[in-house]
Image (spheres, grey):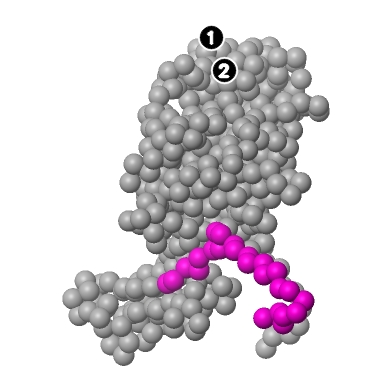
Amino acid sequence: MTRPGVVVAVQTSVPPRSIPTDTGVAFIAGQCDKGATNAPTLVQSLDQFISLCGARVTYSILYDAVDIFFREGGNAAYIGRVVGPSAIAASHTFNDAGAVSSLVLSADSPGAWGNNIKVGIVAGQVTGYAIQVQDMSNNILETSYDLVTQADALSWVNTYSQYLNCVLGTSTNPPAQVAAVALAGGADDRNNITDAQWLAALNTFGPALGPGQVLAPGRTSTAGTQQVCAHAQANNRVALVDLVDTPTVATLQSGASAAAASGAGQYSAAFTPWLVVPGATPGTSRIVPPSCAIAGLIARNDVLNNPDTPAAGEQGIFNSVIGLSQPAWVDSVRQTLNASGVNVIRGMIGGFRNYGYRSLANPVSNQAWLDFSNVRYLMGLGARCQAVGEMFVFAVIDGQGNTFSDYGAALSALCQADYSSGQIYGGTPEEAFNVDTGPGVNTPATIADNQLRAVVAVRPSPFAELVSILIVNTPITQQVA
């Protein structure tokens, strides 16, 4: 028997996580001072970015991009750090009492930042020794608990240290006490970064992380824009493409066309111009590429509405933008840009707002993928359908059709919810979607091959891009029709 109340259970193992379906997540590639290079770093605030990836640096726009993403409403971003091919972590070898290598302690990520920390081996409070990390002004950043063996050091560094990695030396003895010494040899090899390193950073964003927006803020080269577009297509995401900061229409059109030439234009959208935002210090300003602000808008909009609602117009008003990098285009030029898949950000009604939401799909041959909101809806639907599908992996396919029915019902429930929220179009649910798990899809051959199949057909709702109003001046001698 149950009774009213609350039950709290405590366990040592973490329960399994569900498949990610949050469509507001940003996947941002760029250069930063520190951080992992073989895996993405999840940050949920600018302070967390500073802690894990470093402070603002002059050689990269990533800090500013992440700052504006959170200012505009973003709540979670994965950072893919870009470093050169010969990036190395700063390190120092600590010897035992017999001058034989005991521990090799290194910065926990490559880069010159590691040259600015010092490490000493000090006496433990009760017994043994402790590892102490300092900055260059001798401020203590962290100190281990009392250690006795080399294995103790390895355990503490791997479990608790926010600054170090550890490798055992040739000696089997613990390190001798020594005053703090600066780690050395750290380098991020920025001057030798190529397209290959940018691609490696994007590749850390594996598909298991779920849907969202992928961007490389400020990277406007053809190779750069095509890489983010191709990544989006391959990982059930959408790409936010930055174009050269210019008033020249032909250059913007060329950049959009080059990005779409990746073959993944239907999964991507391009925006212009760049944005003026408050500076990192009071009284100053910065210019940032639009992709980061659009990513924040999208995250905010997904919480308030849904992925099929464009983050444009009334839902596309920026929080932090104070100006635009280029003069306003006249309506005829905006029409030309819009037809080329270049979405224009405008200053209007006392503020600044995104005023376009087309993908880079060909508007003639691929019109079904032209509305970027529809593309994002399908991305989210794909992630949610995958989560449903995982529930049926290893389900027994019974001869009475119960599993087929249950599978279809679970998928139909997703679509019914989307129909109720207006994300798919139709006068009735039957006009808006259809889920087929019947014998035409699950044939004897596919069943014998241990497959459970479904076909989900939907009609994503379009958005009103041009709103027309006809005002009729009616004489007072006539009735208003």
Determine which residue is flagged by label 2. 112
Task: Where is residue 144? Give x, y as percent.
Answer: 68, 30
Task: Where is residue 161? Give x, y as percent.
Answer: 63, 32
Q: Give the secondary structure at mark 2.
A: helix
Total numbered labels placed on residues in the image: 2
Give yes or no for residue 22 being in the magenta stretch: no
Res. 90 in view: no
- Rendering quarter of residue 141: top right
* Left or right, 106 with reference to 368: right
Q: Residues within 10 Å of mark 1 (few under 14, many from 20)?
A: few
Q: Which residues are magenta?
A: 458-481
* Left or right, 280 with reference to 197: right
The C terminus is located in which quarter?
bottom right
Q: Is residue 254 above or below residue 297?
A: above
Question: Which residue occupies the extreme right position in the image?
Answer: 282
- Alpha carbon distance from label 2 to label 1: 27 Å
- Rendering quarter of residue 223: top left
Q: Nearer the viewer, mark 2 or mark 1?
A: 2
